[in-house]
Amino acid sequence: MTATRLLSLPLIALAPLLLVACGDEATPDGSVAKGEALPAIAAPAGASWADTVTVTPEGGYRVGNPDAPLKLVEYASHTCSHCADFAKTGKEPLKSKYVASGVVSFEQREVFLNPYDVVIAGLAQCGTKEQFQPLSDQVWGNLESVFAGLQGNPQAVEAAGQLPVNQRFAAIAEVTGLLEFFAARGVSADQGRACLTDAAKMEALVNTTQANSQKDKIAGTPTFFLNGQKIEGTTWEMVEPQLQRAGAR
């Protein structure tokens, strides 16, 4: 889907996609970790790798040692239930055990399956870079209530979706409760509106996201890459052994 098409699609027509946004589950291979363990890498004095956040040239948000030998990238949609499952089951052990060691970094990149993803990403990226992944995890941890807001007022959503780009996303966030949701988590309503009404910023976000997805041939979410190579699986139970085989402990 082109950026222009994504920005112009009627919102109400995309509501069913929220239930089928994710990629299919892959089949675990049952293999176990055999790779030689990589030694931990100490963070600079007074710092913690789990609290070190950088924005990558691809527009992703990376947590951890920027020079980690193992770089895990997740392509994720904020309206994807499988992404929510990974956030709930995998993020804490991934960050506390592997990222904290300095051996693994974890980068989250956007995938836009519908305009709702654009609104949520615009709000999640509206705070500091350190807030981005925690805000994303809050969306996934409350996906049922987020869906209720998105689908609770279809007439207002449809009307908002007809507005010009510099009004559309803020209006959608207003009528779906997303402004309120993010305001309760540190991004004020005024701050959120300012981000979502910046048409140039929003179009650049869509263009960057679409370019990344096309370059890496993203067909479903979540999709994971380790050191630039796509790996199989959509669950933490499948991703963790592959990190371990690469040397993470």
Image (spheres, helix red, strand yellow):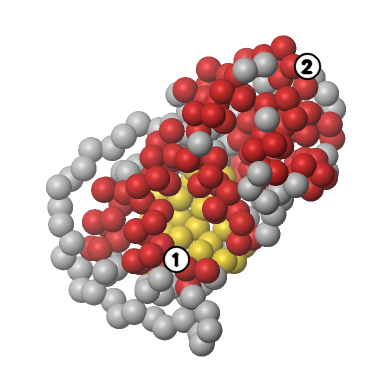
- Where disc 2 sits, the SS reads helix
Left or right: residue 12 compared with residue 70: right
Quarter of the N terminus within the rendering: top right
* Residue at the top extreme, as displayed: 155
Q: What residue sits 64% from the left and 60% below the top?
A: 129
Query: At which x and y percent is residue 174?
Result: 75, 30
Identify which residue is drawn at 41% across, 67% down: 99
Residue topped by disc 1: 105
Q: Depth check: 79 or 224 in front?
A: 79
In the drawing, what numbered circle is on residue 159? 2
Q: CA distance from mark 1 to mark 2?
A: 42 Å
Residue type, label 1: Ser
Observer-side mark, 1 or 2, equals 2
Q: Quadrant of residue 25?
A: top left
Q: Residue 93 appears at what percent x and percent y?
A: 34, 58
Residue 64 appearing in the image: no
User: In which quadrant will I find the C terminus?
Assistant: bottom left
* 112, above or below 249, in the image: above
Q: Are marks 1 and 2 in contact (CB under 8 Å)?
A: no
The x and y percentages for residue 198 are 83, 43
Furthest-front residue in this view: 184
Q: Position of residue 60 (x, y in %)?
A: 58, 55
Element assignment for label 1 = strand
Left or right side of 46 for 161: right
How many marks the image carries: the answer is 2
Closer to the chain start, of discs 1 and 2, is 1
Which residue corresponds to the image point at 31% horizontal and 49% vertical from the top-left? 236
Please tell me in which quadrant of the rendered image residue 24 appears.
Answer: top left
Label 1 CA crowd tier, 10 Å (few <14, some 14–19, many 20+): many
Q: Nearer the viewer, residue 85 or 10?
A: 85
- Say which amino acid is labelled 2: Ala
